[in-house]
Amino acid sequence: MTFIADMKEHDLIVGHYFCKSKQSLKTRVGKTYYSLKLQDKTGMVDAKVWELTKDIQDFNEGEMIKIDASVLSYNNEIQVKVNKIRRSQHGEYVLSDFIPSTTKDVEKMYGQVVGIIKSIENLHLKTLLENILVKDEARAKALKTHSAAKQIHHGYMGGLLEHTVSVAQICDFVCKRYDYVNRDLLLTGALLHDIGKIYELSPMPYNEYTDDGQLLGHLVMGVEMIAVEIAKIEGFPHQLASLVKHMIVSHHGELEFGSPKVPAIAEATILYYADNMDAKVKTIEELLDSDTSPGPWVGYHKALSRYIRKSEF
């Protein structure tokens, strides 16, 4: 098959792709057509089905489909004109070809999470982390396989684990440089700050917001999960529980960024900047990875509200 990143104008392609989205639309003259988003591990592409003939068999978004199509250029972007579609059958494709994934070793990263948990000295916090991230096998699996975002940064399988480890390592480095910073509290917040995303986003490859994700968001969902787990730990200090929850609800840093509270303690402040730095730098890294334009400037990035330049060193 031809991967999306390798598609060129005038290519004729026959292969399997993940149907990320499917819209039934009408042309100006009232003719029905399908507008699709197709995905593989290398990216996503717009596709159009202009003729709904018998060769366009029944399929839904969120399914693997086999297409016969041609590649064209529209507004200087690659687009796929689909002539035939059918549902893919099990055994016809390798799922890993269609799910963007971390390039890092998942088990090694998870081992780093476990190592950080073992280093926590406060028994209440260590028990909380073990119960959520180690003993609960479903959550441990979700941490390994979920993305950290629908798009923008770490939006691929294993992205949540990669981001979590990175933020925890940044926090561990920074906390040694300041007084009045409790390492155990800071690293607990770092490991749990985005845990609500395993419920906010559906599993890969779909990676869409769930109903609860849209209605509540991962900050609220994370705090709710943590509150339930804290209640199971005998003698967990109320003040410590409040500080852990504060780490979660304030980690976006500003009210306009979705935090119901701004950071009020040193640990929450460090977590906010570590999270923000990892997200921003990873966004630039992903932009540079996907750039094929000549010259030193990649272009304007809407989410970052700035032009990005290559370092060239």
Image: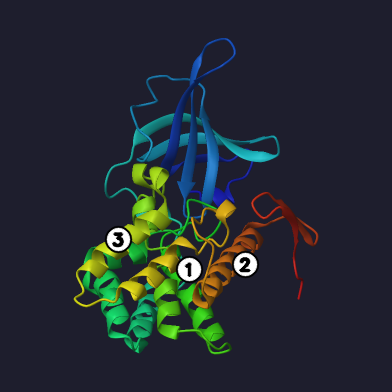
Tell me whether the residue at label 1 lies in contact with that at label 3, contact meaning CB atoms closer than 8 angstroms: no
Q: Quadrant of residue 127?
A: bottom left
Q: Amino acid at mark 3?
A: Met
Image spot of residue 58 (x, y percent): 33, 27
The residues tagged by marks 1 and 3 sit, at their Cα atoms, a distance apart of 20 Å
Image spot of residue 221 (x, y percent): 35, 55
Looking at the image, tell me whether mark 3 or mark 2 is earlier in sequence order: 3
10 Å neighbourhood of mark 2: few (<14), some, or many (≥20)? few
Name the residue beneath numbered marker 3: 225
Looking at the image, tell me whether mark 2 or mark 1 is earlier in sequence order: 1
Residue pictured at 28% horizontal, 74% vertical = 128
Q: Quadrant of residue 225?
A: bottom left
Residue pictured at 53% horizontal, 79% vertical = 170
Classify residue 167 as left or right of residue 92.
right
Image spot of residue 136 (x, y percent): 22, 68
Q: Which mark is residue 281?
A: 2
Given residues 151 and 266, the one toward you in this image is 266
Residue 204 appears in the rendering: no
Look at the numbered disc 2 and give the secondary structure of its residue: helix
The residues tagged by marks 3 and 2 sit, at their Cα atoms, a distance apart of 29 Å
Looking at the image, tell me whether mark 1 or mark 3 is earlier in sequence order: 1
Q: Quadrant of residue 114?
A: bottom left
Given residues 86 and 264, the one toward you in this image is 264
Q: Residue furthest front?
A: 239
Q: Amino acid at mark 1?
A: His
Name the residue beneath numbered marker 1: 163
Image spot of residue 239 (x, y percent): 35, 74
Look at the numbered disc 3 and give the secondary structure of its residue: helix
Residue pictured at 64% horizontal, 51% vertical = 303
10 Å neighbourhood of mark 1: few (<14), some, or many (≥20)? many
Look at the numbered disc 1 and give the secondary structure of its residue: helix
- Placement of 20 over or under 190, stated as above or below: above
